[in-house]
Image (tube, rainbow, N blue to C red):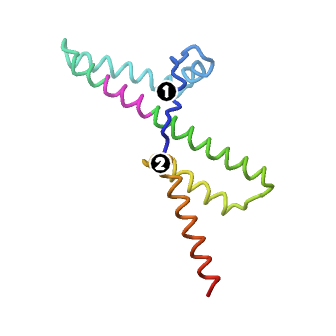
Amino acid sequence: MTQRNPFQEFDREPDEDHPLHKIVRAHPHIKLLMRNIREATKRLIKAIGSDHSPWIQLEELINKHLHAREEILFNLGFEHGYLSGEGEALQMVSGRDPDDKYRAFAEELRILLVRSSLPELLGIAVLLETAWSMCLKRAKQQRI
């Protein structure tokens, strides 16, 4: 449900010398995976011979896929975190301490909103229309 792209707003080259990158590179599981990738690459180069273009095309597609996936995950996480933080701030300001059912429902709703392909204003409109129809239903019930 995001119209902005926080990932692109940061628009920075990754700092491969950042301490976290160094920690990840040194992680035993990552080191093993990288060794396996290097060995598989050597076998692949040997198997395909001198025409590396299909392999390069595949690598480009895989990299585009990984980048797009990373951007989508970042943006979804950003929006979800933003909505969660704002919700918690509103609860604190109002002095309410919602129970677990309330929190679980709010979490489900945030996930639905973030996953939605609707523009943000239409998502808000759906929420308002739903709330309004629930209020009308309650008002009709109380008149009976």
- Dot 2 crowding, Cα within 10 Å, few <14, some 14–19, many 20+: some
Dot 1 amino acid type: Gln
Q: Position of residue 51 (x, y in %)?
A: 18, 14
Where residue 40 sits, quadrant-wise, is top left
Give the side of residue 41 with respect to residue 99, left or right: left
* Residue in the picture at 53% in, 51% down: 111
Q: Residue furthest bottom?
A: 144
* Residue in the picture at 47% in, 51% down: 122
* Pick the front one: 36 or 95: 95
Q: Which residues are magenta?
A: 60-69
Q: Position of residue 37 (x, y in %)?
A: 39, 23
Instruction: State yes or no: residue 65 in magenta.
Output: yes
* Label located before the other in sequence (1 or 2): 1
* Residue in the picture at 51% in, 40% down: 76
* Pick the front one: 42 or 68: 68
Q: Position of residue 95 (x, y in %)?
A: 81, 55
Instruction: State yes or no: residue 22 in magenta.
Output: no
Residue at numbered disc 2: 115
- Which quadrant is home to the C terminus? bottom right
Report, in whole angstroms, how far the alpha carbon at label 1 lies from the one at label 2: 19 Å
Label 2 secondary element: helix
- Dot 1 crowding, Cα within 10 Å, few <14, some 14–19, many 20+: few
Dot 2 amino acid type: Arg
Q: Is the magenta region chiefly helix, strand or loop?
A: helix
Against 119, residue 43 (above or below) is above
Label 1 secondary element: helix
Label tally? 2
* Pick the front one: 60 or 137: 137
Residue at numbered disc 1: 8
Q: Residue furthest right?
A: 95
Q: Residue furthest front?
A: 143
